Amino acid sequence: MRKIKCFILILTILSVLFFLFGLDVIPENLQPQQILEKAKNSDIIIIFNSGGWGNTPFEKAEDFGPIVKEIQKTFNEWGYNSVVIPYSRTKDSFLGKIAGAKDFLNSFNSSSSILADEIEFLVQNLPDKKIVIAGLSAGGAFVTKTYEKVSERTKDSILAITAGTPFWIKSSDSENVLNLNNAGKDSLAKGEIKTLLLSLLEPPLKWLYARISGENLSLSRLTNQFVGHTYNWDTTASEITSFLAQTITQERNVKILK
């Protein structure tokens, strides 16, 4: 028994050291050279960041993908061509998620530096293009940190749209950044601690009660969703289109969607 306890202790210590000092995040590279070719006929490059682990494919990102598609549609109505480039923050593996958790706790210090460098490269080689970096929740935090790290000169070519960024991440007050929080209703963005705790505790308690009552209720059906943390185009269209009209289409007269 003593040997087992010693083994568990050593394993725990190694795990903590590994988490703190090992396995830097290496997100999927944007492959800027390929983007240069892909974006040559586009006016705007949209770099998409999903919420959660940040590895949800764009076509499957039902939480934020539809909003980005509407942004593309809006650009098209205004006479701009755009291309969406999904950015994966975390590799879809166990070790990848450990690395992603580490980077999240470090406020995306590692991965945001990588993306910032890649954006610098794109702006230098595509000076006539606009780049929009957009992200939801953890993706919003990642976008915020990335925007902070690009040079001031590069920021003139970049717009950032964040939705539901966690409250502990300081938002940028730049006119090139739009921070969405569902008109103050997003409990995670506003830091409403009591509401957040209830959102975390309620699903497992409901599951436990169902099990005691003999009801076969899957915990996956009770997946936590913070109050006000769901975003859709109907409630964000006015803010987003107004922001884009002021920052991208200043030289044109555009129709703002209501």
Image: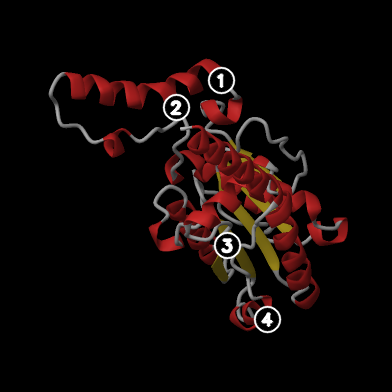
Q: Residues within 10 Å of mark 2 (few under 14, many from 20)?
A: some
User: Dot 3: what SS?
Assistant: loop
Q: Nearer the viewer, residue 93 or 165?
A: 93
CB of mark 2 within 8 Å of CB of mark 1?
yes
- Name the disc covering residue 192, or none: 1
**Count of all numbered marks drawn on residues in the image:** 4
Q: Earlier in the sequence, mark 4 or mark 2?
A: 4
Q: Amino acid at mark 3?
A: Tyr
Whole-angstrom CA distance, mark 3 to mark 1, is 30 Å
Residue 36 drawn at (x, y percent): 67, 80
- Name the disc covering residue 87, or none: 3
Q: Is residue 211 left or right of residue 59?
A: left
Residue 254 drawn at (x, y percent): 60, 56
Q: Amino acid at mark 1?
A: Glu
In the picture of the structure, the residue carrying the numbered disc 2 is: 227
In the picture of the structure, the residue carrying the numbered disc 4 is: 33
Whole-angstrom CA distance, mark 4 to mark 2, is 41 Å
Q: Earlier in the sequence, mark 1 or mark 4?
A: 4
Q: Earlier in the sequence, mark 3 or mark 1?
A: 3
Q: Earlier in the sequence, mark 4 or mark 3?
A: 4
Q: Residue at x 45, y 30 (%)?
A: 226
Q: Residue at x 75, y 40 (%)?
A: 172
Residue 177 drawn at (x, y percent): 70, 46
CB of mark 3 within 8 Å of CB of mark 1?
no
Whole-angstrom CA distance, mark 3 to mark 2, is 27 Å
Q: Is residue 70 left or right of residue 81?
A: left
